[in-house]
Amino acid sequence: MLKKYKNLSNYARTSISTYGIILLAFVILFPLQQAGALSYSFSGMLVPICAYIVMAISLNLTVGVLGELSLGHAGFMSIGAFSGAIAAVSLGNGTPDVLRLVLGVLIGGVLAGISGLLIGIPVLRLKGDYLAIVTLAFGEIIKNIVNCLYVGVDAAGLHFSMTDVASLHMTNGTVILKGPQGAVGIPKVASFLSGIILILITLFVVINLVHSRTGRAIKAIRNNQIAAESVGISITKYKMIAFITSAALAGMAGAMYAMNYSSIVAKKFDFNTSILILVFVVLGGMGKFFGTIVATTVLYMLPEIFREFGEYRMLIYAVVLIVVMLATNSSGAKMLKDKIVDFVKNLFARSKNKKVEAGGADSE
Amino acid sequence: MKNFKKVLAVAVAAVMMAACFASCNGEKQTGIRVGGIGPITGGAAIYGQAVKNAAEMAVEEINALDSDIKFDFKMEDDEHDAEKSVNAYNTLKDWGMQILMGTVTSGPCTAVSTETNADNIFTLTPSASSTDVIGGYKDEDGNTIERKDNVFQMCFSDPNQGTASAQYISEQKLATKVAVIYNNADNYSTGIYQKFDAEAKARNLEIVSVGTCTDETTDFKTQLNAAKQAGADLVFLPIYYTPASLILKQAKDIDYAPKFFGVDGMDGILTVENFDTSLAEGVMLLTPFSADAEDEKTQNFVKNYKEKYGDVPNQFAADAYDCMYALYELCKAQGITMDMTAEEINDKLCAQITADDFTFDGLTGTGMKWSESGEVSKAPMAVVIENGEYVGM
């Protein structure tokens, strides 16, 4: 069966492994969660893990498939999170939860996609390190803009201000976003089920994009931009497609994330969060979605599992991160692993041979 | 070989999931389970650490008392992040937490108090001062978020500090022209400034210059020069003590010597490393706790804390210490036992804390009372720094 699996096309293998693990996780965990058999701690982590998986897959599209290092991915998450939150709050308590969630996520995705377009125009003219630094700068700009943005809603509609709450000029309304104090009173409508659906949508979009004509063009740009240009591939167009898709998906993840917490602050979506997601991608493997899903889940849960170690928790987390990176990527570790695998194989082979020999001796 | 890696990854993930499924509740319960959440690591660790130390000290003392009320205390780290804070809260729920003493900082507490409100777990925060933590606060235009009716604060709320500062400055006639430097990227600082601004206007206190800074600002000369040129004779600093120490230093460099007035975040300025404390002479601050206070309670607390942890406790430590004793008094008054559910305890404690005849005397104030709004009412105390010590005003 393994052989059959190996003989499948790359597309089929990626689809089976990624959809498979997500559906498997859902089939096992959803009934357990409904029955209350999961610990509060684990149950509480399900939605953020889903959001981070979507973040990591979307970043993998930029970093792994397009081959451009982006250090401002949390900025798109931020745009999605705050616009989604504003949409959900302003829809009011009378609206069904599902509608608030779906509209919030959609609006978050669309706005993040538009900002991806606006940011992409100047950014994608650059390459390599320069592009990385500029994305970092845009991430910080987004954070700082949200930090001085005030938004409220009352009977007359939405009010925006860049100075303070008083200048919103509202009466008997709800202040949604209060600059550095963040957004409060967000309805908690995100659920594990919706998180899984969002991951499946993301996988569907990304896997099909990667394995389409567009995806091949994007990969051609990654492998050799000059060669790609020489055969008539429009560099800007395909870079833009990848970048905007990535931004829009990050925005949807952000909206989902925001609607799992009653309050969020702009500070959360800073450089550190961008790097955290990049770590998920690097450990999961460039352009590999199955690996990204597993790496995100494991790395998200590690600090929580390490709570038992008390104050040394983050130190141990950092050490584990270093060890895992070394173990999966250094050539020395690979050689060691190969040796171990060979040794185990030989062991099996020898014991088999012995059995055959022994059997042969018996029969004589 | 690729498969080997995958199998390994899946195996590791499976083991971890198994570890998470099993909600470890192995420890034997020896008292009412009180959980604490705060930043033990990261940038705000100094606050979480102080709360943890003081709360553990208080629990040891309480458990040594000859009383039916015993506490089990466990503190979890949240790195001053709302997401981690909710994770920490869920971990404590798995542990069997019945009361929450936390969380330490405002942003994370706003997220966690919504959870405790939904789960009916009684919450008393030592130091999360934002009104979003307790909810239900109405501003001038009637804008509000829902009150979380089982969440109470031990510290002053931000607006109270801002209002009290403006009141104090105008009543004591400390100044006529005031300059403000606040951190507009910070929840706490912005909250205080807004209320100070409103109250100052109401009291005809003239604000002649408003300077802003962020967490990363280290050069305040522009803001100080603006204040100097506007002729401000008092500079109000609703910020934490580390940037405040830089401001004092740089004000001296440009020969600007107004009065400086801070709030509780200024507490700790005398302990900043390599800071010339003579610069802080004459600085006034509004703080509920001073480690140099003469009363027996404070002196004992400071002595024991120093013995145990080797440094002088700050206001966060005092707030946490008060929280544990307040919980003790509340539990004693209602006869709480450790086999009650969190919900039962919540109902009883909510009724008790807002009861007319309940008052609490602690390190940070005497005759403290709580209203339905969740805010504490205690007298604000202003101190001035003289000869490197806090002196009451």
Image (cartoon, coloured by chain):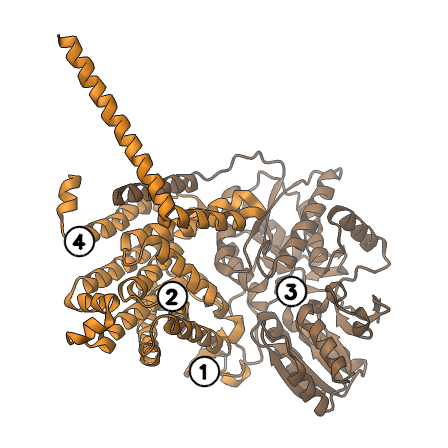
Chain colours: A orange, B brown
Element on which disc 2 rests:
helix
Q: Nearer the viewer, mark 1 or mark 3?
A: 1
Q: Nearer the viewer, residue B177 or A94?
A: B177
Element on which disc 3 rests:
loop
Q: Nearer the viewer, mark 1 or mark 2?
A: 2
Q: Looking at the picture, which amino acid does disc 2 mark?
A: Gly
Q: Quick one: label 4 or label 2, which is nearer the N terminus?
A: 4
Chain on which label 1 sits: A
Cα separation, mark 1 vs mark 2, equals 21 Å
Left/right of residue B209 with respect to residue B234 in the rendered view: left
Q: Which residue is at 39% across, 48% downward?
A: A298
- Asked if the residues shown at circle 4 and circle 2 are in contact, with their CB atoms under 8 angstroms apart, the answer is no
Chain on which label 4 sits: A
Q: Which residue is at 35% across, 70% downward?
A: A128
Q: Nearer the viewer, residue B30 or A19?
A: A19
- Asked if the residues shown at circle 3 and circle 2 are in contact, with their CB atoms under 8 angstroms apart, the answer is no
Looking at the picture, how far across and down is residue A134, in whole percent? Answer: 40, 75
Q: Which residue is mark 4?
A: A10
Cα separation, mark 3 vs mark 2, equals 33 Å
Q: Which residue is at 21% across, 60% downward?
A: A207
Q: Which residue is mark 1?
A: A160
Res A148 label: none
Q: Quadrant of residue B351?
A: bottom right
Looking at the picture, how far across and down is residue B110, in whole percent? Answer: 53, 63
Q: Looking at the picture, which amino acid does disc 4 mark?
A: Asn
> Image height check: is A144 above or below A167?
above
Q: Quadrant of residue B48?
A: bottom right
Cα separation, mark 4 vs mark 2, equals 30 Å
Task: Kindly indicate whether the residues beneath marks 1 and 3 are on one polypeptide chain.
Answer: no
Cα separation, mark 4 vs mark 3, equals 61 Å
